[in-house]
Image (spheres, rainbow, N blue to C red):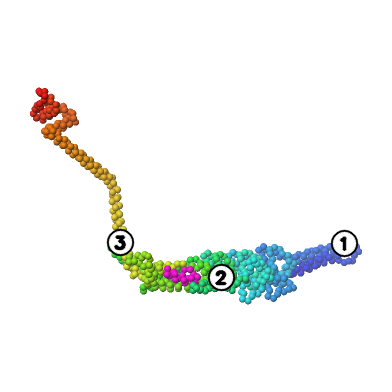
């Protein structure tokens, strides 16, 4: 302000000296006087120029502002003839107070801006990724009765409504705004809008495998919200949950699918519902008795009882269900596969609040009750024949449940339990996919006899296998010994074959010799009938001698020396040979009559 006053004074004096620097109108009488006056006039004009320049500089320095590239200039008027209307915060027509206009980056020339206004600069508002900016308007129209948050701007008008003048002249409401600022950079009038970005303004993330059920506290304009949507079928006996279309106040019937949503948490509450298949285990929480069977060295079966404490796993839905069958209290473990479909997620939230509440308040009590009732009443099983097989065609009977049915007819019990639990799940909007019973902790007294029979059977099978193994080992050893003796066995087999061959050959020779002798005997007999037996004998002897001489010719000379000359008649036939033969053996030679006589 002081600079402005000094500037005005310097400018006024300078102008005065410039235009009034001629001085007195009295004419000088001498040349020296005229020169002095001229110099004085020039001096005053120069001083006037200097003073005017200084005044203009001082005034100009109060008439411009410079805004940084990352800044937003704000003006607050100090001097004005008009006051702000009552209840208003931001001036639209240049009244005193914060101004609706803001200044962008660079130089701005506004006459006496530094005099008439207080200047303030704010940084450009930045909303980071994954967050939204929550807006509160400090000025605007008062909210209607019953409204606690201003309705959202239409999408096509959001950018314009963020301008202060447009907001104040287009019906913007004072107070919290449903509209939020999505990630980005914004130049806003910070006198009008307060924007908050904190951990509480994180974006709503619906992860994969989940849906978001929205409970809205505001209604969008232009939507008919009078007719509510009934979420479940009353004929099923389910809980009746009123749902509303999207944009109305209440629980929306359409859940949000996986993704990122910038929802103002002052206006909307989002509940995540897991729509993946869940496994609920009812396990542990009891002491299990066990009888162990063993076999000593003599083959006697020994039994020892022990106890095992089955603790409840940390992730189990509840402990095992105790059922009473034939007077026995039996812990029965089971597993349930459940799933909430996306369409039923609003029902779950609207009826009980969430899947955990359904598990604890509805389904777990129902499962325990149904399992006890089914296991302790009757079971529908196939009729078996006397041999233990199932009759064909299959026929069923309904009879009281027995303890061993928990093992032998588990599927029949599972089907009955599953059918009944599905009805309870439908009432709460939960799909029961499967019920599977675990291994029951049957009292060991009921199983000892069966275990002993099984063990005896196993011992019998083991004995049979050992016997078969011994026999196999003997066969293997025999095969190995046979392989080791294979060369000698081959030789023996060949010798046997040769002996057999020789035997067959000798038999054939004997048969041939016998045949020959028989035929020879027949010939000799015929010859004896013709010649007489003595002559036949003589001929046979002679034949042998001649055969020997034929084989060994050297005997002829020896015979010639030993045999004396014997005169034989010239008769033909065997006379000569007989004579020689008879002479050699010392028999008397006698003449055989011939036609010519002899010497």
Q: How many angstroms separate mark 1 from mark 2 (CA)? A: 99 Å
Give whichever of 143, 176 is nearer the camera. 143
On screen, residue 501 versus residue 52, left or right, reads left
- Residue receiving disc 2: 252
Residue at 58%, 73% in the rendered image = 227
Secondary element at image label 3: helix
Q: Position of residue 429 (x, y in %)?
A: 50, 70
Sequence-first tag of 1 and 2: 1
Does residue 356 appear in the picture of this structure?
Answer: no
Does residue 446 appear in the picture of this structure?
Answer: yes
Range shown magenta? 415-432
Q: Are marks 1 and 2 in contact (CB under 8 Å)?
A: no
Name the outermost residue toward the front.
530
Q: Position of residue 512 (x, y in %)?
A: 20, 39
Query: Residue 123: which disc?
Result: none
Number of other residues with Cα within 10 Å of mark 3, as a class: few under 14, some 14 to 19, many 20 or more = few
Q: Are marks 3 and 2 in contact (CB under 8 Å)?
A: no
Secondary element at image label 2: loop
Give whichever of 573, 323 is nearer the camera. 573
Q: How many angstroms separate mark 3 from mark 2 (CA)? A: 70 Å
Residue at 61%, 73% in the rendered image = 149
């Amino acid at each position: 302000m002081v600079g402005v006053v000094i500037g005005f004074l310097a400018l006024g004096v300078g102008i005065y000296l410039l235009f009034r620097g001629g001085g007195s109108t009295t004419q000088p009488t001498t040349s020296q006087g005229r020169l002095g006056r001229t110099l004085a006039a020039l001096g005053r004009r120069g001083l006037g120029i200097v003073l005017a320049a200084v005044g203009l500089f001082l005034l100009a320095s109060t008439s411009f502002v410079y805004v940084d590239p990352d800044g937003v200039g704000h003006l607050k008027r100090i001097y004005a003839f008009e006051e702000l209307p009552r209840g208003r915060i931001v001036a639209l027509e240049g009244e005193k107070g914060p101004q609706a206009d803001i200044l962008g980056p660079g130089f701005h020339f506004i006459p006496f801006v530094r005099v008439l206004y207080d200047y303030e600069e704010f940084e450009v508002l930045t909303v980071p990724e994954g967050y939204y900016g929550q807006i509160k308007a400090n000025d605007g129209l008062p909210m209607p009765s019953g409204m606690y948050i201003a309705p959202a701007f239409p999408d096509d008008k959001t950018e314009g409504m963020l301008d202060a003048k447009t907001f104040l002249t287009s019906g913007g409401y004072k107070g919290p705004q449903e509209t939020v600022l999505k990630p980005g950079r914004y130049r806003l009038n910070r006198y009008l809008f307060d924007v908050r970005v904190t951990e509480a303004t994180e974006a709503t993330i619906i992860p994969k495998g989940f849906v978001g059920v929205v409970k809205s506290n505001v209604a969008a304009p232009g939507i008919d919200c009078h007719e509510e949507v009934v979420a479940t079928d009353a004929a099923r006996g389910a809980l009746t949950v009123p749902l509303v279309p999207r944009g109305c106040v209440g629980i929306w019937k359409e859940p949000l699918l996986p993704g990122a949503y910038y929802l103002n948490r002052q206006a909307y509450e989002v509940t995540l519902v897991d729509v993946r298949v869940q496994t609920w285990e009812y396990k542990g929480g009891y002491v299990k008795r066990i009888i162990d069977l063993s076999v000593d060295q003599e083959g006697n079966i020994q039994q020892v009882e022990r106890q095992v404490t089955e603790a409840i796993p940390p992730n189990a839905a509840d402990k095992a269900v105790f059922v009473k069958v034939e007077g026995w209290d039996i812990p029965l473990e089971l597993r349930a596969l459940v799933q909430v479909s996306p369409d039923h997620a609003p029902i779950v939230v609207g009826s009980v609040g969430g899947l955990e509440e359904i598990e604890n308040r509805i389904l777990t009590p129902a499962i325990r009750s149904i399992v006890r009732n089914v296991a302790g009443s009757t079971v529908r099983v196939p009729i078996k024949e006397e041999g233990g097989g199932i009759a064909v065609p299959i026929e069923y009977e309904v009879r009281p449940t027995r303890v061993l049915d928990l093992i032998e007819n588990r599927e029949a019990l599972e089907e009955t339990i599953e059918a009944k639990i599905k009805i309870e799940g439908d009432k709460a909007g939960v799909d029961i996919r499967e019920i599977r019973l675990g291994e029951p902790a049957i009292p060991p007294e009921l199983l000892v006899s069966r275990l002993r029979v099984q063990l005896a059977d196993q011992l019998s099978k083991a004995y049979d296998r050992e016997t078969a193994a011994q026999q196999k080992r003997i066969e293997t050893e025999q095969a190995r010994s046979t392989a080791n003796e294979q060369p000698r066995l081959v030789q023996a087999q060949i010798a046997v074959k040769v002996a057999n061959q020789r035997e067959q050959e000798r038999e054939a020779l004997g048969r041939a010799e016998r045949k020959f002798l028989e035929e020879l005997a027949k010939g000799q007999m015929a010859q004896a009938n013709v010649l007489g037996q003595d002559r036949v004998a003589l001929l046979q002897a002679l034949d042998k001698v001649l055969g020997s001489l034929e084989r060994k010719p050297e005997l002829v000379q020896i015979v010639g020396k030993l045999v004396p000359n014997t005169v034989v008649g010239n008769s033909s036939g065997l006379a000569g040979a007989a004579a020689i033969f008879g002479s050699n053996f010392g028999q008397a030679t006698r003449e055989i009559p011939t036609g010519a006589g002899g010497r």
